[in-house]
Each structure stands twice: as structure tokens, then as C-alpha cells.
Amino acid sequence: MARHSFTFSSSILPAGALLSAAIILVAELVLFPKSYLVADKSTLSLTRTAALLDRGPDPDLAIIGASRSLAIDAKLLQDELAQFNSVYNYSVPSLGTTLQFAMTLEKLLDNHRRPKALLISLSPEIFGDPNFDALLSLEPERQRLRRVFSLRELFEYMPSEEKLLIAPTYLQNILNSLNYRVLIKGYLDYVFFGVDPFDVGDPISRNKALIDHMKATNGQMLYWAGREVADDDVPVYQIVPFGCTVCPEVDGFYLSRHAYIYHVLGLANEKEIPVIVFMMPIHEKRFMVMQKYGNFKYIAAAMQAFEREFPNVLFLEQNLKFDKRFFGDLSHLNAKGARIFNKHFLAAVKRLFEQGYGYKQLSDEGLFFDIGSPVEGKVYLQGFDVKEHKGATWRWNQGSRSTFIFPWLRSKEPRRYRVTIDVQPYVAQQNREMELASPVESVCVLLTPGRRKYSVDLLFPAGEDLTLSAQYAAAVSPFDLGRGQQKRELAVAWFGIGLHYASPP
Amino acid sequence: MIFTSYQFAGFFVIVYGFYLLLNHRGQNLLLLIASYVFYGAWDYRFLALILLSTCVDYFCGLHIDSSNNATKKRAFLLLSIGTNLSILGFFKYFDFFATGLTELFSFLGINLSYEPLSIVLPVGISFYTFQTMSYSIDVYRGDLKPTRRFFDYALFVAFFPQLVAGPIERARHLLPQLTTPRTLGREQFYEGSYLIFWGIFQKVFVADNLAGLVDPVFHADADPTGGEVLIALYAFAFQIYCDFAGYSNIARGLAKVMGIELSVNFNLPYFATNPEDFWRRWHITLSNWIRDYVFLPAYIGLRNLGRSGMLISIFVTYTLIGLWHGAAITFVAWGVYHAVAFSAYQLAKPYTSAFFASRGERFRRLSWPINVFLYFHVTVLSLLIFRSTSLDQALLLSQRMVSDFHLSMIDVVTIKRLLFFTGLITVVQFFQCRYNDLMFILRQPAAIRALFYVVCFYSLIFYGHSDGKAFIYFQF
């Protein structure tokens, strides 16, 4: 054992250290969480996005992107797109890195009801620089991560090859004061020395106004609202698409170089969320540089590859070349540019959704949902609950009725589907009728003992999530059964549901 | 692995955790391994040099002590000193002297070609070689009994808190603390923690930030005004002091929380009133080393020459101090500058002493701030030579201060920054000096201490450099 003897000395007590620790603790919990008020615009919007992801309302339509897509007025979309009651802009200024897109989507799906659709804005730079995402060695970048994601989230969402960076990233920014140190230092420089490193003047009043604006627009933030980019500003970089001017027609070539985009789109596909991928307008000078280097060919090829890989993805083609008058700097739209872009963007998105886009069209083979292996031969629902299975939502909410909703499947026009159910009735060894219904018509099916498949044709309305109801003939609600708990077996064991077009589109 | 880096924090936490669990012998073995790991983190190849120096001095010490033959004793002493000076000479001074000789021959009309070897300087070499030499000399003089425990001696040479930048410990001070079991009092723990904290503040907040005011002025392509040079000099005075004193404080603090007392290396040097006083306060362990092993033997050896002997001893001593800092003519010139100041002071001392004695205590007290102010500027001017990359630059910048000096040209923001980064340390040092207590802060009421800690903590948070700049004295 150690040979130390710890002797008590009353001359020096750790009271000073303890008191200072208490002061620091209070400052960290009360004062420094407000540091976003002295932050730059990017940090301000990061903080707001983090709060939206943590505690904000559930979005029907979510916008994910980098700093440029902060120009999107989500409130305008919310007001104009009837299908979506809530539209929020979750763009994270991240120098265009797509790692944070993936992490943002993961967090969004963890903390919120699944959105009906996603709008994902990609920066053209990510199609030119293979090292574009390798920015984690930079302190501001680490702080960006820390501001939006907790330690658990960082560990959970980070790709495995980046996980080793998490602990140092987090520890170096664990205190709120550390997380905002660059900005607070900038503010102190402004106060003490009259030096304004970020060229913002008094950041507190400016930021309060920006926060109000972001609240009013569900997340719009303009870097240079009233400025026009200077004539002598020139693109400071050139994007070279891996040295290819004629891009090869090999999917893997593109997909392997965009792991994080692949992850985002794959995750959305897995969750059956329709995605519209788009790009924000590009300054005319930058556009010309990109054109010269053949970037658009590359981007188009990459997008086609993604569309082939993920049926839920659609690339929205727009006019990307914007006049320099509409930019506050080489990348970001000013207020005038944002107004014009939002108008055109709204029209394009509205047209797509009104046409019924965004939802997986059934292939010739149709789709069959394997509902799974019923526990001990029976599927249980807890009370009047809602469950999700492979993107379908099923509810046991009307006593003896089950409702299945397929939010990713929506027709441009009223369509007749062939619905196949794979079920086994429990209740009695005798034939029973079960009613299958769409919102506009219903059909009765005679169930016979044993597991069997039954097919019926049903008409479903246009522009709505495909919703199928099943009224069990022999079922009663749990309370009617006289049980003390709201748990009961269904009248049938569900094994699967198949959907096909009843006639060719 | 720099003291102010996250890596070192992790390293020390692990080492300290095990240290508290082990008994005395286990602690020593742990510290030795940790010291080699610490040093090896810079360049493991140079561990061989430390091991060589350790082995040679350990065995020389034993033979010097056990031998009854004076010639033999001297031979082993020379072997020890020769080995250490050879290591030091080759790695630190070979290029300097070889280039100098080539230039000298060239001046005499004999052209020799010499390509500098660009030898990598092992970090801390000047510190541990001086430390091990003092051991052999002390054993030779009979001031110290050599240790028979090799690992304890190896730890004395390589003890990681002071391995790369001192304090240069004497064996008679440090070795007994290593060979006998240690106790750690709570008070010692607090003091150690405070020294670490204050040292980090000196280094990270003061020194590293002042570098931003100093480096641009001394850059080879810089074209500063006289005012900018002056401000940079003031800044450098605080930078070099806080960099080195900060390191020493961290080293002392680290040792202290392990129950080991290292020597004080700085004692408010900018409150010195004369050269003698200054060298009792600045890099004390080096000053004492040079005094005991160079100046006094030289002075005693030359005492027959009277005042000339004293002056020769002073010039040799300070030239060596300058050269110890680096193989560059600027360091030699810096040493000569201090030799001139010290000599002038020694020559004038009988008259100034009589002058002050005749005017009484009150006059002495009143003149104290003036003396401090004047000698501070003597020191600051010496740093112009120390910091310059060449004598030409030192001369040019000196000229600028005289010929191109206008108060209106001094940037107000720069002055504000200088005051901001030096304000707290100046106030603290004033009170340390006033109460003659380096632990002055620890004697204050809890509320004042808490306020002090909070201010220092957030100064470090907001103005600390996350990249962990290297300590200036590592290069020496």
C-alpha cells in the first residue's frame, strides 16, 4: 500500500477551489448557454437547429442542407403546401460537409415522428473534392458537432471510422464556455480592445433580430441580406471532378465517393421517406467554372446513380445559374435572391407534390410486406396503440378495427390496387367475414380456418397516403372482453400484406 | 508531450493514479519508466544519451568515492565531465564552432569548406548534463555520498517534471528525496496544485498570447518602427519569463503533489534592483550551478590578480551562461552584456553602498521603485540581443528605437493587449514581492482565491491556445 500519510492542515483549506468550482458550474449552466447571443450567424443557426432537433415540433416536411439552404423560407412552404402542416429548415452550416446531413437525419428520426418527405440540398463542392468531408481536425468543425449533437448522439451517429475522434472532440468542448470560446473571445476582443474580429459590430442586438427572423420563417437565415457580392469577387476554388470529363457509367464509382450522401439517402429509403434532392443556385462566375470543368456532367451522373439505387429519391432539376445581383457573397443568396429562389423553388416543389410525386411507384411485381413472425402465433397490440413496421403504420384504434397506413405510397390519380392479405383467423374454426376498406370503398372477405392469402381489388383516392382498414368480424375491444389490461389478441394473425396495381398505370 | 497538452494531462493522471497506489520502491520504478516514456515521446533515440550519461556518472560517482588515489579520483571525474561535455558539445555546439573556425580561417586567407551537419538538438540536453555533472563534482569534492541504487540515480537524472527544462537540481537536494520514502501532506498537495495551475496560466495565457505581439516584430522580413520594437521588447520580457517560470512552476507543482520538492527557479526577477540581485532571482538553479562550479573556482583561482581576476571570472561566467542558452553569437553577446552590467555594478558597488548608507533606510525605500524600474529596463534591453536572430538585427532594431520612435505611431490596441495579458501577473507579483511570499494567493481569504481562480480559469479558456505551444527553453 502507499506510504503516504495525508495530514490535515487548517492553514489552507480548499474552500477557494470549491467556491470557484461552484461559480464556474453556475456560469456554465446559466451564463454560457446564452453565448449564442454573441455568436456569428452560422453558430446562431446551428444552435437553433440543435434546439429544433431536440425540442422542436414534428415536421411533416424537413429541409436538410448546409449554409446555402438556410435561405429557404420554410414557413412559406408550410403556408403554400397543403399536404404539409409543418415545414422546418434543419440546415446546418457545415462547410457543405454531408457527414452532418447524415447525423442530422438520424437525430431527426430519433426525436420526432417520421416526416412525410425530405428536401435535401447538396452543395456542388462535394462532387468535386474527395476530401471534402475530412474537416474534423479543425476546431470550429469539432465545435459545430458539439453544438448540435450530444455525446451519446455523436457515438451513435458517427460513422465507425470517425468514432475514435469523438471523445477528444467532445472533451475539448465539453463546457459551454469551451464550446463557444472562439466567439466569446471575439466578443471580449470587441469589448476590451475595440477589435471586431468577426466584423459584426454589436452581436447581441443583431442576433436577437436574427432569432426573431428565424422563428418567423421556420429557419431562414441570410448571411448577407442587404449586400450584393462585389464585382471583383472571384471564385477562390476550382472543382475538379476526379479528373474525368466524360464520366463513367458505373454506379459504384459515384456512390463510393459519397458515403455520407449514400447513408442519408439509404436511411431515408429504409424508412420509406420520399426525398427530393436539389441544389441551391450558383453564382454565375462559379457556375462557369463548374461548367468548364464538367462538374455538371458529373453531378448529373451521380444523381442518376443515386436515383437508380434509391427509388425514393428524385433529383429536382432547376436553373442553377443565378445572376450575381442575387448573392451576398459567392455562395449565399442575399434577400433579393432568396425571395426569387423561394418563389421558384416553391412552385417546383408544389408541382411535384401535386402530381403525387415523392412516393414509391409500384413495380410490376408489386410489393409484399412481411409483417413478421407473430409471437406464439399471435400478433399483440398494446391497447389502442400505433405501431410502425417497415414504413407502414398500423393502428388498433377503433375497437375491432385495424388501420394500416402506407405514407410512402401515394397515387397521382385515383388508382385501383389489388390488396392481398396473408392471415390466419384465431377465433373459431368456422368461416368468418372480414371487411377490408379504403377511404372510398369496402369489400368483404370470407375467412376460412388456417393460414391463407386473400386478394381483393380496392379503389384508393389520389394524393393521399394509402390507407387500408380491416374490420374483424369476430373481434371485440379489450374492455368488452372484460380484461383488466388493454391488451388482446387480434381476431387474425397477420403475416403480410401485398399491394399491386389492379390495372397497368 | 508538452505540459500544457491534453496528452500530458492524460499521461500524468494515469501515472499519478498508479503512483498513489504503490509503495516507495514501486513509485520510483514507476517514475523512472514514466520519465523514459515522457522523454521517448519526443524522440526515443535520444534515450540512449540519457542512459549513457546516467551509467557513466553512476559508475564514476562510485569509483570516485571508493578510490583513495587522488589521481584516480580525478580521472573518473574527468571521465564524467568529459562524457557529458562531449555529448553536449557534439549535439549543441559542433556546428557553431566548426562554422566559426571555418570563418576564422577564411578571414586569415585559408579557405576551408565545411557543410554544417545540422545535428538535431536533443531536448533538455543542457539541463540533464549539468545535473549529472554536478553529481560527479559533488562526490569528488566530498560534499555528497554517491548512491548505490542505480534506479534511484537514473530517476534523479531523468525525473520527468524537470527533465527537459529544469530546474537543474543538485543531487544533494533531490537524491535524498528519491532514496527515502516520501510523505504527502494535504498542504503540499494544494500548493502543488496551485503551482501547476499558476504555471499553466503563465505559459498559456501570458506567454503564448504575448508571442503574437513579439514574433512579427522579430521576423526576418519585418520592418517595425521604434515604438513597435519597444512594445515587442516589453512583451518579450514577460513572454520569456512566463514561459520559463511557468514551466518551472508546473514542474515544481507536479513534483510537489508527488511529495517531492524541487528548487525554486524564479523569484520575481523583474523586481531586482541590480545585477547581483537579478541573478539571485532569474533561473536560480543555473545561476547557482555556474556560481558554484565555474565562477567561484575561477575567482579563487585568479584571486591573485585582484580586480582583474574578478572581472575575468565574471566575463568567463556570463559568456558561458550565454553560450549555455544556445550555439549562437547573439547568446554570447547577451552573456557579455550581462557581464558588463555585472562588472560595472561590482566596480561601483563600494560607492553606491556608501551613498545609500549615508542616506538612511527611508531613502533606500523610496529609491527602490526607481532601482527596480531602471534595472528592469537594463534587462529588457538585454533581451533585444537575446531575441534577435542575429547581431545585425539586434543593431538594426536598436537603431529603430532611437531614430524612429514616435509615441503617436504606437498602436493603441497593441498596448491594450500588452496590458491585458500582463496585468494580472504584474499585480500578483507585486503582492508576492510586497509580502515576500510566492504563495501569497494561497494565504488570501477563500472569496479572493475563488475570484482569482475563476478569472484565471476563464482567461485560459478564452485566450488559451488549444494547439499547445512548445516552451521556449526546450531549445536550450
Image (cartoon, coloured by chain):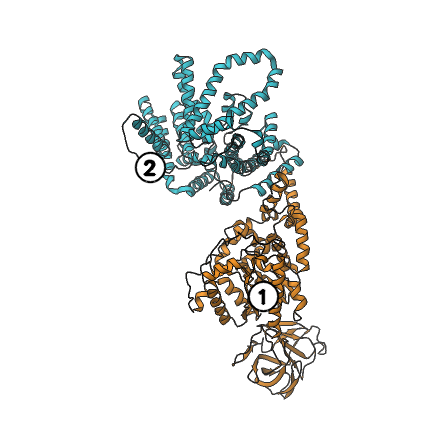
Chain colours: A orange, B cyan
Residue A332 position, x and y percent, is: 57, 56
Image quarter of residue A368: bottom right
The C terminus of chain A sits in image quarter:
bottom right
Disc marking residue A119: 1
User: Mark 1 Cα within 10 Å, few/some/many (few <14, many 20+)?
Assistant: many
Across and down, in percent, residue B104 comes to: 32, 27
- Real-space Cα separation, disc 1 to disc 2, in angstroms: 62 Å
Q: Is residue B156 above or below residue A150?
A: above
Q: Between residues A34 and A107, which one lies in front from this camera angle?
A: A34
Name the one closer to the observer, A333 or B315: A333
Name the element at disc 1.
strand
B273 lies above or below B32: above
Q: Tell me the SS state at disc 2.
A: loop
Residue B163 occupies which quadrant of the picture? top left
Percent x, y of residue B309: 40, 15
Q: Nearer the viewer, residue B122 or B257?
A: B122
Q: Chain of mark 1?
A: A
Amino acid on which disc 1 is placed: Leu
Give the residue displayed 52% in from the left and 38% down from the top.
B212
Are the residues under badges 1 and 2 in a single subunit?
A: no
Q: Is residue B384 visible?
A: yes
For image coordinates 42% across by 16% down, the residue present is B310
Residue B216, image x, y percentages: 49, 37
Q: What amino acid type is highlighted by mark number 2? A: Leu
Q: Nearer the viewer, residue A342 or B95?
A: A342
Q: Is residue B182 visible?
A: no
Residue labelled with disc 2: B117
Q: Chain of mark 2?
A: B
Q: Is residue A230 left or right of residue A19?
A: left
